[in-house]
Structure formats: C-alpha cells, structure tokens
Image: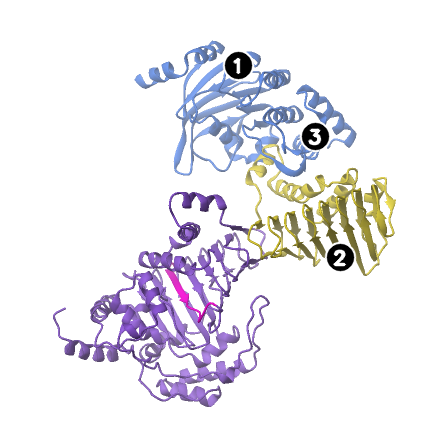
Amino acid sequence: MGKDNQNILQELETSDYKYGFVTDIETETIGRGLSEEVIRLISQKKGEPEWMLERRLKAYRHWLTMKHPNWAHLDIPEIDFQDVIYYAAPKQTKKLNSMDEVDPELKRTFDKLGIPLEEQMALAGVAVDAVMDSVSVKTTFRDTLAEKGIIFCSISEAIKEHPELIKKYLGSVVPYTDNFYAALNAAVFSDGSFCYIPKGVRCPMELSTYFRINAQGTGQFERTLIVADEGAYVSYLEGCTAPRRDENQLHAAVVEIVVEKDADVKYSTVQNWYPGDKEGRGGIYNFVTKRGLCKQGAHLSWTQVETGSAITWKYPSCVLLGDNSSGEFYSVAMTNNFQQADTGTKMIHLGKNTRSRIVSKGISAGRSQNAYRGLVQVAKGADNARNYSQCDSLLIGDKCGAHTFPVIKNANPSAVLEHEATTSKISEEQLFYCQQRGLSAEDAVGLIVNGYAREVLSKLPMEFAVEAQKLLSISLEGSVG
Amino acid sequence: MSVDRVVNSVDARTLHGGDISSGCWVIRDRADVDVVVKSGERADLIVIDTAGAECQRVGIKALSGATLNVVHVITESYDHKLDISMSEHVEVSVTQLVVAGAKVNTKAHLQGAGARFVLNGSFVHTDDERGDVTVDVLHEVGDCVSRTAYRGVASGKAQGRFSGLVYIAQDAQRTDAEQLSRNVTLGDAVIHTAPQMEIYADDVRCSHGATVGQMDAEAIMYMRQRGISAADAKRLQIQGFVADTILHAPIAGCGDAMMELLMDKLDRL
Amino acid sequence: MLKIENLHAKVGDKEILKGINLEVKAGEVHAIMGPNGSGKSTLASVLAGNEKFDVTQGSVEYNGENLLELNVEERSRKGLFLGFQYPVEIPGVTMANFMKIAVNEQRKARGEEPLSPAEYLKLMREKSAIVELDSKLTSRAVNEGFSGGEKKKNEIFQMAMLDPKLAILDETDSGLDIDALRIVATGVTRLKREDNATVVITHYQRLLDYIVPDYVHVLYKGRIIYTGDKSLALKLEKEGYDWLINDYKEE
C-alpha cells in the first residue's frame, strides 16, 4: 500500500495495543492444576477488576460441587482436571522460517481450500515481518464499526472498558450453575470475543474471528458474548476452514448471545477440527455450551458446518423467551475415520407464538459415529408454539453409524410440532449416473454430498459457503474405497 | 368397565403358556408367560392384564413362517412387558391399547430374514395418570421390515411418555423401518416423545417422525358444517385419532369391544 | 329464503367475490356455472361460513336472519347444508357415529328429543337406500378409503339424513361416472320439496338433465354476469363461455 515495512510494523504494534487485541505477552505459565489460588493468579495477570474475580471464584466454588456429565453414546476417557494447565499466555507458536518447514499435509489442505499464501503463513506460524493485507483490512473495518457505535473486541478488554455491559449480560444466558463445563469456564475462561450492537443498528459487515489476530492461539476456555440491542442485526462468523492444530486436548467454551426485542442475530460456524491421524489419536475434545436468549420478536439463527474433531459435544440452543420470537438451527456434521460427533440443538419455547426450525444433515463415513440429539421443549404457557425439525443422515460405507435421538417435551395443548428423520445411503443409481458422465467415484460422492447439504450451506454467508463446500469434499477423502 | 368384554366378544381359548397353533387364544390372569408359535402356524392372541396384579410379562417366540396377530389391552397401571422374537419370514402384527397410567415395554427382535413387524398402538391418559410406553424394534439381521405407529392423547394433569427405538445392527442390510409417534395434549397435560434411531448398517431405508398437535383443520370445518360445535368437533376428532388404531385391529370381532373400552376412557378426556 | 346483496369476499389479500347478487326462494333449484377460478367454490364456502374468507362488503339474508352473523355450526343447525367439492377424511370417526351426533344437534336446535338408537338405525337404513350407499360404509371412518363416487354419494346421504332447508352442492358431479351421476342426481331430486331449495354449483350440463334448474347463473371473475333458464346450460355446453364473456366485456 505504499508504506514501508517499518511503518507498518509500528502501526501494527501500536494499534494492536490500542485495541487490546493482543493480551500481555508473558513467558511464564502457571503450573498444572486448579485451585482458588490459580484463579486469583489468572485474574491478576489479566488485570481484572475485583468484581470479575469474585464472579470467577463463585463459579469455581460451585464447580467443585458438580459431577462430570455422562453421555451414553460417546466414548470419553476420564479427564483429569488437575492435569490441565489453566493459564497459558497466548504464546507465540513456534515460528518456522518458511513454508517449506510446514507439514506438507497441512500445506496440501491449505492449497485445496484455496487459502491465500499470506494467510497460510500466518496460520502455519511462519515468521513474517508484517502481513500487509491484514493490517489495512483491520484498520478499515474498525473505523466503520466505531462510527456506528458497534463494539467488537476481546472479552478481556470489554471487562475493563465496558464493565456495565459485561456486568449486565455476562452469564445471563449461560449462568455458571447451568452445567459442569459452564461452571468451569466461568471460573477459568481465558479470553474470547465481545460484541455489542446498539439499538436499531444493522452491522454492515460480517464479524468474524478472522479479525482477531491471536485467533490461532485459541484458549481452551473461550468465552464469547454477543449482544444485539433492540432492533439490531449482526451476522457473526466463527471458526475457519483451515485445520486447527492444537495440543490442547480439552476445549470447554461458552458462547452467549442476547437478542433483545426485535433484534436479529445470525451465528455461523465452520469448523474443521483436524484430528491427529487416521487412527483417531491425538484428537480434541470439544465441549461447548452455546445458547441464545431471544426476547420479544427476536430472531436467532445458528448455522454450522463441522467436520473432524475427535469428540464434539455441542448443542447450540435458543431460549425463546419473548412472545413472537423464533429460532433456527441448520447443521451439517461430517464424520470420517474414527471420529465421533454428538451434536444437535435445543429449542425451548417459553413465550407465546414462538417458532423454531431445525434442519440437521449428518454425513458419516469410514468408521465414524454421528449422532443427532435434539430437544424441543414447549412450556405450559407457551401458547401456539410451532416447530418443524428435519434430521437426515447419510451413510457412506457400511462401517459407520448414524443415530438420531430427538426428544419432544410438550406441555401446551395448542402446540404444533413436527419432527421427521430419514437415514439412507448414497444411491448406486446416482453414483453410476455421475460416473457415466465422467466423474470419478470420489468426485461423484463429493457432488452428491454437497447437494445433500445444500439446504444448510445456503444459509452460510457467501465466502464461508464456498469454503465449507471445499471442506466437505476434503473431509470425504478416503471414504470412497 | 370390564376388559372381559373384549375377550367375551371373540371365540377364544385360554392359554397358559406353551405352544400356539391356529385359532384364537387369550392370555389373562398370568404374570409371567412364555408362548411359542409353531413354524408355519397362523394364530391370533389376545393379551389382557389382571386387576390387582403387580406386573405382567409375556414372551413370544414365533418360529419360521408363522403369522401372529396380537391384541394387547392394558387397563391396569402396573408394569407390562411384551417380548417378541421373530425367525425368518415371520409376520407379526400387534395392536396395543393403553388406557391407564401404565408402564409398557414392547420389544421386537427381528432375527430372521424376511420377518415383518407391525405395531399400532394408542395411549390415553387422563386425570393425573403417568404413562410410560416404550417400543424397541431391533433389526438384528437384514432384509426385515418394521412399522411402528403410536398415537397418544393426554388430558387433565396427566403425563405421557413415548420412547421408541429402532436399532439396526451392522450387518442388517436392506432393512426397511419406519416409526411414527403422533400426539395430542389437552388441558394441563404433558407429553414427552423420543423416537430414536441407532443405525450401524448403510443399505437401509429408515425413517421416523414425531408430531404433536397436528390435526386436520379441514375436518373440523366439515364437522361444523354438519352442525357439530367447534368444541365437540375437536373432541370427536381426537377420539377418532385414537380410535383409528382400533378400527384397524387385526383380530376381527374384538374391535367393537375395544372401541367401547376406548370410548369410556375418552369420555374422561 | 336466501337473499344475497352486493357480496364481496376475499381470502388473504385477494378479492374473489366482487359483488354477488342472488335471490333464492323456497321450492327453487338454482344452478351456478362458470369457468374455473370464477369464485364458485368461494361463494359456497362463504355462505357456509368458512373462516378462511373475509366478507368485506354486502349482506346475506337467510329466512329473515343475517346469515353473516352466525358461525359455521349455527348456520348448519338452521338448515344450511354444504355438499363439499373435496370431502375430507376423518380418521377413526365412523360415519354412523358422526351422523348420529349431527342429526341430534339439528334436533336439539329444533327443540326435539334425540333419536333412540333404534330410531337412528332405521333412519340410516332408509336414507342410505336413497343413494344406494353400501351400508357397510357407515361403519367405516368418514370418507376414509372412499372412492370419488362414494364420497359424493356420501355427501348426498348426509344431506338426506339432515334434511336441510337450503342445500348448496359444490361440484357434486365432478369425478363421477354415468351411474354414480345418476344416483347422486336422483337422490337430490327425491329430496326436493316445496319448502326447501337447492343451489347446484356445476361445471357440466349433464347433471342438470336430472336436476332441472329453475335458474341458471353464470359466475365470472367474482360476479354473476348472466342469468337464464335451463336452456342456457345447454348453450354453454355447446358453445362454451367465450361468447358470454365477450359480451360482458363489451358492456
């Protein structure tokens, strides 16, 4: 852009600090294990105000009284909570000197996904003096947001800069009492995104975690809070299609979304948890509590495309508290090799005239197990609730499994709820047809799978949709034998 | 309201266990019974529960090529178990009517290719009854067909629960399974429904559905045009919803008696 | 008996009836014909009181009362019968049971005692004979598994059971073969008296060979554009609607 490297570097350093995107660089870490002392240390290192420390301690004390949940269909090995490091500064991941030092498998994936070179370098941890595009993009969008009064920063910064918003909303959707991991997270969360859209404001761009420079150093215990004030709109993207290499075995994140009266939030996730190897070793346990609270007339839409992972356990849910509020859930979950996925959603109808819609497409290949677990609950006072759920499973090969466990709990006579699910495999006829037109078996399967997932993919913001499609194709590798 | 009238309406022999050959049989006053339907036989079986008992278990083994129609009427609120094993080319059709706050568990093991299992059931819970109905259909081998359809109505402060499992083993290829759970709640009643599928084979056709409150509005309009009030039309429609199962019961003759039993219960909605 | 003045009705945002004027007296048979989409079924539905439609203007007087103020079942109990174009199925509810309740509602509205089971059975046998309806069908669920012809016969059977003052038959002849048509039509004619009236909505002239109308109206785009006698029906059958519509357009 015409500036020389030095200037850019300077700008980078100062602007980063100004917006607080990079937390203090520390070289020390706290030893393994969890105790009140560790929590105090965490809070101190982050420079948090007293009230925040109090909240953490309260959550920790409550966590001590809770038991780890037990889900029948997942094979979760015992997790020793004292064997985990609860605070590690976002360390500089080991810097490589050039792309040649990058794992060729990883590079191949990057290329297939069409990720531009600069980004590849940043993601792979290659030392660069400056990533030019990122800087300019970052600066531009920050200004646009600031003009509209939109706040988009890290939670750590928000705790310091916008305490009144944090105090009002943090924990209002997923309180620490909610479940085992929510309590743990509330005690030790490292960092995450905070986003606030003022009344009546329509956020002009998709907000994405791409824009947080230390996205690659994702904490294990991320905490995200998104608040759309009355009449506001925001589309938020999480994740990236590039494989996440992570030594952290355990991820217990919490995502809270508050959708005030007549507001509209769209939350999209495209995640590729790249498991260690084809034998399923070295994978990641991903326990996420994601929940949105909808006030009157509010609308929340969850869209996710997930592949890989060792064990994923997440149920984005909508609490339809306000009258005339509505929630949607669109998901494609793809498993291969030895992966296990247990995903689904919860729609809780509390207000009157609420609506929810669930479309879940599971694709299982290899020796994987893919389970959908959903809950549609209609409370006694939730007059005229409407729900439609469709959960389909596609099996590729005969060694994988697809399971569907929907639960409907209805306590109101005027509710109209409908759930449908089908399980099938790719038809021989479809495959033959494609192959007769010159496609390889693998390409044919890829094409068919994408068609199968179309309804969900069409809900994603454009760029994400393109990447997601590629991601699905890659994830199918080796499944067609 | 005596469940005896269901039995009295057909010409049936009482069965105390053992082999069934052709004809119509009744199991009643028995807490624990095992029955075998011989190869190639066609039989009808009516299973009734007994007042004052604590539980009832009926185990049925249907040998290859047998055809069995079962009518299972539950009027007492204790635990009931119906366990059916099916060999190749066996056809079993079960009609189940639950008009008490009972726990009912039905398991069908499809163990031979070509077996076909059909279950149509209805439960009606009123006042403050608590019901718990489970239907597990286990496709242990391939080339079998199952169809399960359960309808539930709960009114007053009753609570109904339906759990259905369709399990398809890894080698159970070319399975064709369907499960449907349809429910209506009235008043302060609550219904939980959880149809489940666990599928380990890929060349299968398997679907399930669950609905709550889906009733045809056109039918209400039709009835009102014939002078029936909106409230009565709705009530009639719900009665029809549950009675539909009985109207198609496979054992001729006991249908009317079951209807009466059902209507008595529906009057309490 | 029936006086419709300037009736306008819409469904959603779409206006379908755009000013209907019609008068039907006791003892009369009126036929309403017209191309598809002209509003024939809508008129029938609106008169029956289907809440899907909104009346935006106009009035309907029925035996001295404001019909529009009454709801669906109230209109029925005052002797208004609609023979549906697509009779719906009601699973699990037997014809016999359904009709028993309906008949007794009518009787209650008239201040009469409900029928005893024996009396009711007799009535059913009598009336099903009129339309040659297989008595086995009465123990089946309403319209379930009935063929098109059986459904239409079933409508007339119900009409016979309820003995209405004003019967509106919506395309009762559609989908019927010659025999079924004859049976349905004969049934309707046998029920005709000096003190009741019938409005037959139809597409085809052939029904009117059996049910001879006193008046034939042509409904086009939500209005009655022409009224004639039974010879009009014959002309429409031979020449279609174009000549009439063109005339209407030129006015």
Left/right placement of residue A362 relative to residue A214 reads right
Label 1: how many residues lie within 10 Å, few (<14), some (14-19) or many (20+)?
Answer: some
Task: Please provide percent x and percent y for residue B99.
Answer: 73, 51
Left/right placement of residue A367 relative to residue A468 reads right
Q: Mark 1 lies on which chain?
A: C
Mark 3 or mark 1: which comes first in sequence?
A: 3
- First to last magenta residue range: A262-278
From the image, tell me which residue sits under label 1. Answer: C206
Q: In which quarter of the image is the N terminus of chain C?
A: top right
Q: Quadrant of residue B246?
A: top right
Disc assigned to residue C138: 3
Tell me if residue B146 can be seen: no
From the image, tell me which residue sits under label 2. Answer: B81
Between residue A267 and residue A12, name the one nearer to us.
A12
Q: In which quarter of the image is residue A239?
A: bottom left
Q: Quadrant of residue A465?
A: bottom left
Left/right placement of residue A62 relative to residue A295 reads right
Q: The blue chain is which one?
A: C
**Is C236 inside the magenta-drawn segment?**
no
C-alpha distance separating marks 3 and 1? 29 Å
Tell me if residue C141 can be seen: yes
Between residue B91 and residue B103, name the one nearer to us.
B91
Between residue A437 and residue A45, name the one nearer to us.
A437
Task: Please provide percent x and percent y for residue C207.
Answer: 54, 16
What is the secondary structure assignment of the residue under circle 3? helix
Q: Which amino acid does label 3 sit on?
A: Thr
Chain B palette colour: yellow
Left/right placement of residue A413 relative to residue A465 reads right
Proximity of marks 3 and 1: CB atoms separated by less than 8 Å: no
Q: Which chain is purple?
A: A
Q: Mark 3 lies on which chain?
A: C
